Image (cartoon, helix red, strand yellow):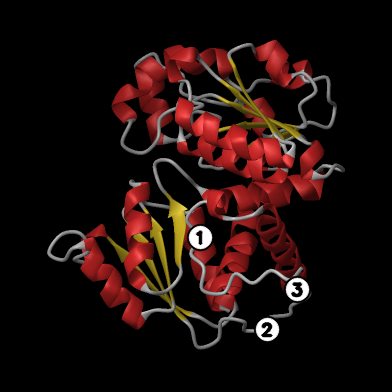
Amino acid sequence: MAVNLKGRSFLTLLDFTPAEVRHLLDLSRDLKAKKRMGIHQELLKGKNIVLLFEKTSTRTRCAFEVAALEEGAHVTFLDSASSQVGKKESLEDSAKVLGRFYDGIEYRGYSQEVVELLARHAGVPVWNGLTDTDHPTQILADFLTIEEHCAKPLSKVKLVFCGDIRNNMSYALMYGAAKTGMHMVALGPKALSPDPALLAKVREIAKETGATIEVTADVAKAVKGADVLYTDVWASMGEEAQIPERVRLLTPFKVTMEMVEQTGNPDVLFLHCLPAFHDFETKLAKEMKAQGHDIREVTDEVFRSRHSVVFDEAENRMHTIKAVMVATIG
């Protein structure tokens, strides 16, 4: 059955059927192959998109801009300092105005309610570039990367997310795993347990797709037989004051070579949405180390090892974001 996503917003993978998620991954692979061959079809020629950023970004901004430009679209970037969105103009009014100018709107910020409000009032597709509770474009890149490096269908893959299991990446991975029939384990301390209502929702979806969503603090049990180990920074943007407590809670769940070996899988993959604290070469890592806090969520040994596919994963942000734009406004 043909999949048509024209005019749809991309706010969360919960809004999409397994067949629609599969379509986006297949389209991403096709667009990536065409780029490698030097083929640009200008599938977004004549389109205008706007990027709204409340949170700073490297990969998300660059991925949207490059993907759009390669397919012939024009891009406007607006951050909090360069627009009146939510300040002198309500979000609803801003959405209605931007929807008259642009064919698509990307939002990266804090509240999921904001991106949903934009989608209700803009009249054009709105794409979620990250919120405090979701990161759907990242999940498409993650799953494309897994398919490229793991000789299994996603429905046979075991992915273990290690660390803060109630952050946006953990939740987004749960949504994606539930939709694709994946076995996902959220490995972290009980003090940072996921929202029970959210768990109930994804497990209900999992009943239809054959997925398994587990939550545990048992490292050895969780990682045994894993195909993918995944982690994220221990404190998200705006949570820096919580770093000392997070280090205390999450150090037992740091991805180390010992954990890699505990999987029993010599080909286990390591994924990370980036940026990562894997050494002490960043300003924040140095400052925290001087205060006695090792904020590395993964060791440098693992990050630079043959298991790590984080830079393939980062590149795939562009190909999958391109697919979302082409599918919805192309």
Q: Which amino acid does the dot numbered 1 rest on? A: Phe
For the N terminus, the quadrant is bottom right
Q: Is residue 14 above or below residue 251?
A: below
In screen coordinates, is 283 left or right of 178? left
Q: Hey, what amino acid is under mark 2?
A: Gln
Mark 3: secondary structure: helix
The label number, if any, that marks residue 41 in the structure image: 2
Secondary structure state at the residue bearing disc 1: loop
Q: Return the x and y of residue 172 as percentages of the image width and height.
A: 54, 41
The residue wearing badge 1 is 10
Work out whether 269 lies above or below 79: above
Q: Crowdedness of circle 1 by 10 Å Cα count: few (<14), some, many (20+)?
A: many
Report the front residue among 243 and 86.
86
**Gap between marks 2 and 3, in whole Å?**
9 Å
First in residue order: circle 2 vs circle 1: 1
The reply to whether dot 2 and dot 3 touch (C-beta < 8 Å) is yes
- Give residue 134's position: percent from left, percent from top: 47, 44
**In this picture, is 42 found above or below 282?**
below
- Who's the residue at 74% across and 44% down the image? 146
User: Does residue 246 appear in this view?
Assistant: yes
**Nearest the camera: 110 or 35?**
110
Quarter of the image with the C terminus in it: bottom right
Q: Which mark is residue 186?
A: none
Q: What residue is shown with label 3?
A: 34
Given the current orientation, which residue lies at the most extreme bottom position? 46
Label 3, residues with CA under 10 Å away: few <14, some 14-19, many ≥20: few
Q: Is residue 290 left or right of residue 194?
A: left
**Which residue corresponds to the image point at 29% horizontal and 69% vertical from the top-left?**
95
Q: Earlier in the sequence, mark 2 or mark 3?
A: 3
Q: Quadrant of residue 6?
A: bottom right
